[in-house]
């Protein structure tokens, strides 16, 4: 039985960011850049007025003489002639500064009389111009390879005249449930049946980690049907069967996997909850078998699936990349011989420190604790007791 760290090592062995694909900039949020990307233009591409007013030579603005208005420059329609001594151009925010002008007198500082203006407020320095390139320059690197793109990158890339970008391909994940007792939400339950619920949370979690998830439905408790679901997942990078991972007479997932030629790499992990988690290879796919108990499935996905998906999606390498620390609000007992993960919720204390409150019932069959729990508290093998207010490692669930 492997430790959590050994299991992650097994999962990540030989795994690296997948190949690149090109997508429009409207879809960049949450993706990882596959290569450096440079600006295709200078932004702004010309000196522009930051205010509505009059473009003048600053030396003229310091005088009290009348200045002649020789034209106007609204945004998108530059004034084509230079501004000479004693001349001004009516300009609007975003309008290109005409040649010869180095200052904008805002309209509140001007009195206009026909085609002439008088400056009625002292002008102390050249102002109100956004110079070319103050945002970025042609050829400047805006995105580095491996960078996680967010909601604002689309506008940044658009301003740089970049219509599309090469990103790391999302890992394709095929997910299927297993169990004759499972029915879909909304159906009438017969004696002994339960609602099939795990895949909803798992799908959402894996998409948030950068995966592209397809749910293949629920396989019956027969090797034949489970083999058929594995075959449907043939083009996936990761296959995740849920349930059927124990050693009962109706646990057929691993026998079906072996019958298809799958190679088993580990069958159990020294973790609580999630001990039945297993991993193997089937043709070109990595297979991560999750336990059927809800908490076990979600915790195992957070520990092992997250590390693998993030690696293939180009996001990060190991569990440590998404682990942080907090203070526990209550004392925690010494841990036993399996690495343990407690569902908990984050709260703040009077000092502003991040604190975590474990949920009362940690039974692995329960889903309701996840309505409040947004982190897992990690307790290493034989970790000593922790007093209230003591530091603990946490892994964020959402």
Image (cartoon, rainbow, N blue to C red):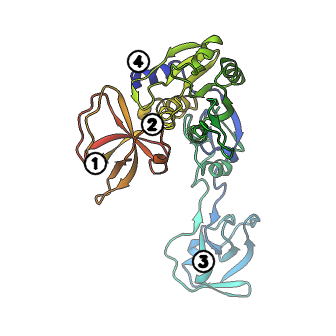
The disc placed on residue 330 is 1
Are the residues flagged by discs 2 and 1 in contact, CB closer than 8 Å? no
Q: Quadrant of the N terminus?
A: top left
For the residues carrying marks 2 and 1, which lies nearer the camera in this image?
A: 2
Q: Nearer the viewer, residue 86 or 144?
A: 144
Judging by the rendered image, the residue that carries numbered circle 3 is 106
The disc placed on residue 364 is 2
Disc 3 secondary structure class: strand
Are the residues flagged by discs 4 and 2 in contact, CB closer than 8 Å? no
For the residues carrying marks 2 and 3, which lies nearer the camera in this image?
A: 2
Q: Is residue 31 visible?
A: no
Identify the image quadrant of residue 84.
bottom right
Identity of the residue drawn at 74% across and 73% down: 72
> Height in image: 325 above or below 105?
above
Density class for disc 4 (Cα within 10 Å; few <14, some 14-19, many ≥20) is: few
Density class for disc 3 (Cα within 10 Å; few <14, some 14-19, many ≥20) is: many
Q: Residue furthest front?
A: 191
Judging by the rendered image, the residue that carries numbered circle 4 is 1
Mark sitting earlier along the chain (2/1): 1
Q: Nearer the viewer, residue 215 or 85?
A: 215
- Spatial CA span between label 3 and label 4: 75 Å
Mark sitting earlier along the chain (3/1): 3
For the residues carrying marks 3 and 1, which lies nearer the camera in this image?
A: 1
> Height in image: 300 above or below 88?
above
- Spatial CA span between label 2 and label 1: 21 Å
Pinpoint residue 158: horizontal percent, then vertical percent: 68, 50
């Amino acid at each position: 039985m492997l430790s959590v760290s050994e299991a992650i090592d097994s999962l990540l062995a030989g795994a690296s960011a997948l190949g690149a694909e090109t997508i429009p900039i409207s879809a960049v949020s949450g993706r990882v850049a596959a290569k450096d990307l440079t600006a295709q233009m200078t932004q702004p591409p010309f000196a522009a007025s930051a205010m509505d007013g009059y473009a003048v030579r600053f030396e003229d603005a310091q005088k009290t003489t009348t200045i002649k208005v020789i034209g106007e420059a609204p945004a998108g329609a530059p004034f084509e002639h230079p501004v000479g001594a004693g001349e001004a151009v009516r300009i609007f925010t975003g309008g290109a500064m005409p040649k010869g002008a180095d200052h904008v007198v805002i309209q509140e500082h001007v009195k206009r009389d026909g085609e002439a203006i008088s400056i009625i407020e002292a002008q102390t320095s050249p102002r109100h111009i956004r110079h070319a390139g103050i945002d970025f320059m042609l050829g400047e690197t805006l995105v580095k390879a491996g960078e996680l793109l967010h909601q604002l990158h689309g506008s940044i890339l658009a301003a740089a005249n970049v219509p599309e970008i090469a990103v790391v391909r999302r890992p394709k994940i095929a997910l299927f449930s297993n169990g004759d007792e499972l029915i879909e939400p909304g159906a009438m339950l017969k004696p002994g049946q339960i609602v099939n619920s795990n895949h909803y949370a798992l799908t959402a979690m894996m998409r948030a980690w950068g995966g592209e998830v397809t749910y293949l439905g629920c396989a019956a408790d027969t090797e034949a049907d489970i083999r058929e679901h594995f075959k449907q997942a043939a083009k996936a990078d990761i296959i995740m069967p849920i349930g059927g991972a124990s050693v009962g007479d109706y646990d057929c997932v691993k026998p079906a996997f072996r019958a298809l030629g799958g190679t088993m790499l580990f069958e159990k992990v020294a973790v609580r909850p999630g001990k039945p988690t297993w991993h193997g290879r089937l043709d070109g796919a990595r297979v991560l078998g999750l336990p059927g108990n809800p908490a076990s499935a979600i915790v195992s996905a957070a520990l092992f699936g997250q590390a693998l998906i993030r690696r293939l999606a180009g996001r990060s390498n190991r569990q440590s990349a998404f682990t942080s620390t907090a203070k526990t609000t209550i004392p925690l007992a010494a841990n036993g011989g399996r690495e343990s993960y407690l569902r908990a919720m984050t709260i703040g204390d009077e000092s502003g420190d991040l604190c975590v409150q474990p949920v009362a019932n940690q039974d692995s069959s329960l889903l309701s604790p996840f309505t409040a729990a947004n982190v897992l508290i990690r307790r290493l093998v034989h970790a000593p007791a922790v007093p209230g207010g003591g530091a603990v490692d946490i892994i964020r669930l959402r």
